[in-house]
Amino acid sequence: MITGFWDASAVVPLLLEEPQSGPIEKIIRKNPGMALWYGTRVECLSALNRRQREKSVKPGDGGVARKILVEIFEGAQVIEPVHEIWIRAERLLETHSLRSGDALQLAAALVWCREKPEGRLFICQDQALREAAGREGFTVLPVR
């Protein structure tokens, strides 16, 4: 059973070595099933490409990261863009201080859990999104 919804900010440390990679890897070992928003793949590739342009990724690591991302998506439950996500995202934008992409992520998580976030994990590094997910009833990881 998938117990966790993963935001792009939590997926990237699985692709590239970062300070938060250790805690994020510990979470995935304990909770191996992943639910992901349809747009997370593009967000992860955006982060990866930005870091390659900044030259903060070692040569060769980008190709490895892309392969890992493909594997993650092949094994995950991907939440497709559906009308219900738009409706929820619009409410979330009125309720929380979120950017549009973060509202779509959280809306996808709410669709995934059928509006019953209690006992469900929301794995995320972005502070505003973490706070909104917690207020919506998710258990937010990693714990800070």
Image (tube, grey):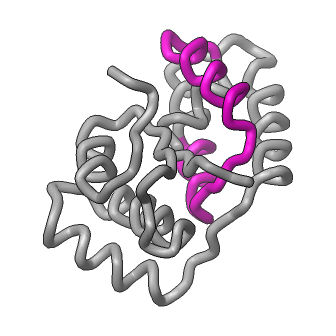
The reply, left or right, for residue 127 in relation to residue 29 is: left
Identify the residue at the far bottom of this view.
83
Quadrant housing residue 126: top left
Indicate the quadrant containing the C terminus: top left, top right, bottom left or bottom right.
top left
In the image, residue 18 lies in the stretch drawn in magenta: yes
Q: Position of residue 52 (x, y in %)?
A: 60, 25
Residue drawn at the location 78% of the way across and 44% of the way down: 72
Indicate the quadrant containing the N terminus: top left, top right, bottom left or bottom right.
bottom right
The reply, left or right, for residue 15 in relation to residue 111 is: right
Q: Position of residue 65 (x, y in %)?
A: 75, 30
Residue 1 vertical placement versus 55 (above, below)? below
Q: Looking at the picture, tell me which residue is in the foreground, 54 or 73.
A: 73
Residue 114 vertical placement versus 83 (above, below)? above
Residue 41 vertical placement versus 90 (above, below)? above
The reply, left or right, for residue 140 in relation to residue 52 is: left
Q: Looking at the picture, tell me which residue is in the foreground, 67 or 32.
A: 32
Residue drawn at the location 58% of the way across and 53% of the way down: 40
Identify the residue at the far front of this view.
119
The reply, left or right, for residue 75 in relation to residue 84 is: right
Residue 66 vertical placement versus 20 (above, below)? below
Quadrant housing residue 140: top left
Residue drawn at the location 50% of the way across and 45% of the way down: 121
In the image, residue 28 lies in the stretch drawn in magenta: yes
Q: Position of residue 110 (x, y in %)?
A: 44, 68
The magenta segment is: 17-46
Q: Position of residue 101 (x, y in %)?
A: 38, 60
